[in-house]
Image: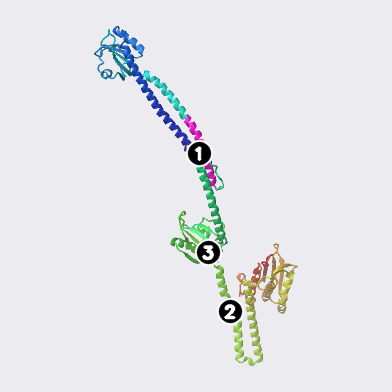
Amino acid sequence: MTFHWTLRFHIVVASAILSALIVIAVSIFVIQDAESRALDLLDERVATQAELASGISDLSGDQQRFVIRTAATLGGRVTVLDSNNVILADSHDTSLVGVNYSGRAEFVSSDGTQRLNDPVLATEVSVAVRPSIVLDAPGLQVRVVIPTSKATDSIRSLRAEAALGGIFVVVGSIVFATLLSGRLTRSIGTVTQGARLVASGDLDHRLRPEPPQEVEQLANAVNEMAAQLNGLLARESQERNRLQSILESMSDGVIVVDEDRIVLLANPVAREMLEAPDDFVVGQPLYALNRNYELNQLATESLEAGERRQSEIDFLDSRRFIYAIAIPLPEIRDIPGRRSMMILRDTTDSHRLDITRREFVSNASHELRTPLTAIKASVETLQTGAIDNPEVAQEFLARMAADTERMDILISEMLELSRIESGVEPLNIEVQSVRRIVQLAINQITPQAVNSGIDIDDSGIGDVSHGVDELRITEAITNLLSNALKASTEGSKITVTAWKESDGSLILSVRDEGEGIEASDLPHVFERFYKADQSRSSGGSGLGLAIVRHIAEAQGGSATVISVPGEGAEFRISLPSESPA
């Protein structure tokens, strides 16, 4: 800020101007009064000198000598006139002898003294005319003229003194105003600095009230304002933290946009649902958060109509289903513009559950229909007379028993899968020998392997222990061995290995030497009722690998498959170092 805009400058300038005006006014009044008094005194002096000159006896003698001597004594002009106002002698211009002065103001007016311009002296003069009182000079008149400069010369020095005194007064007022304004502006500067600290966020700062009283009141007002702001901000911060906690803990996504579709708020769940870019920040347009047309259009319709809008949106890129509700917010008095709040709920799991349920019913019906159809056909065959042939009857009864066992296995696996998925049975995690668990599974599958001429190699399992649920892991390994057995041909080998990773996780591997799995089938092999090629579908329900995956996930792990067509397949179960309770 430049000095000429400061309060101090204005105070100093105002004081200087006011002092100068006062000095000028007083000087004019005093000088004019003094000048008036001096001129009045001059008039009195001229009148007195004229009366004295009119009584000098020399008036009756040499009149020219008289006027010269008298003028020299008085310091002015002296003229002798007769009774007809005709000049008889003049001290400054003898050529005026014989001139009639009857028309001049000093002879026309009845005043004793006149102030006028004298053409002989070429200046303003004071004039007095008095009749002669000398007995030997009857009828004569004496005219005395003294320049007014005799009186005004003293006034000039008075003007100089007044000007010098005025300068001292103005300078003194400037100095005094500077000192006084400096003290005042320092107090105001202290208040200003304190107010800036408060404005910058230091609400605990307090000002020290200093005189004058107005500055003290201003400092107290700033302190009171800081205290109130501190309380308001504390409450606002508390409410904001509470709102932030609520938004962050919500399972639903929340987005607030203004009338220009600028995002004013987006909680973490909303960012995750919409797979927001890493560089997205609040203040960017809604399409920068997600470019889905339906989502942006929903916000637009809600803002334009001022009504609630809702829609279920299919995000094809992320394969998500999100149920979105857009609600217009009431306008805030101090913040112009319309706003809309969008609430997002992820319904992907519900959709997938519905799809899974429908597929499960369809697949279960299909799997049960085949043995039921076979049993029904065998019963009808027996009813038509085949029962009377013992050999044929035994054959059909054997088929019916096999189909019944197949249905029993299917239903048992369906119930087992349901129990694992629901989590109704708690995990029994204990540190067990992995070799012992694998051997239990191999013992269950050995008869089938011997009959098929397939060798099972478990030599790759070292002395490894891990915290697992023994029954479920045994079942999972048994299912993997059974699946590998079905994919293997006579004379091939199934390899079972187990090891610990550097992070402490356990890896269980079952590898066969079958035909392998096509790349298009790999993402689906762990789905319910999914069967890849014919070699892996014969005699199976399609639930074994799904059970393996759910057992692994129930213990915090995962199930994966690695396969190249023609080179067999390797199934792995990975369990973390610390399984969930």
Q: Earlier in the sequence, mark 1 or mark 2?
A: 1
Give the total of numbered labels: 3
Secondary structure type for disc 2 = helix
Q: Earlier in the sequence, mark 2 or mark 3?
A: 3
| Crowd tier of the residue under label 3, counting other residues whose Cα lies within 10 Å: few below 14, some 14–19, many 20 or above | many
CB contact under 8 Å: marks 1 and 2:
no
Locate residue 273, reporting x and y percent: 55, 63
Which residue corresponds to mark 3? 344
Locate residue 556, reporting x and y percent: 65, 67
Locate residue 343, reporting x and y percent: 51, 63
Q: What residue sits 66% from the left and 88% below the top? A: 394
Spatial CA distance of label 3 from label 1 is: 61 Å
Q: Is residue 208 left or right of residue 517?
A: left
Report the span colored magenta. 172-200
> Mark 1: which amino acid?
Pro
Quadrant for the C terminus in the image: bottom right
Which residue corresponds to mark 2? 366
> Mark 3: which amino acid?
Leu
Q: Earlier in the sequence, mark 3 or mark 1?
A: 1
Q: Is residue 15 visible?
A: yes
Quadrant assignment, res 372: bottom right
Q: Nearer the viewer, residue 3 or 33?
A: 33
CB contact under 8 Å: marks 3 and 1:
no
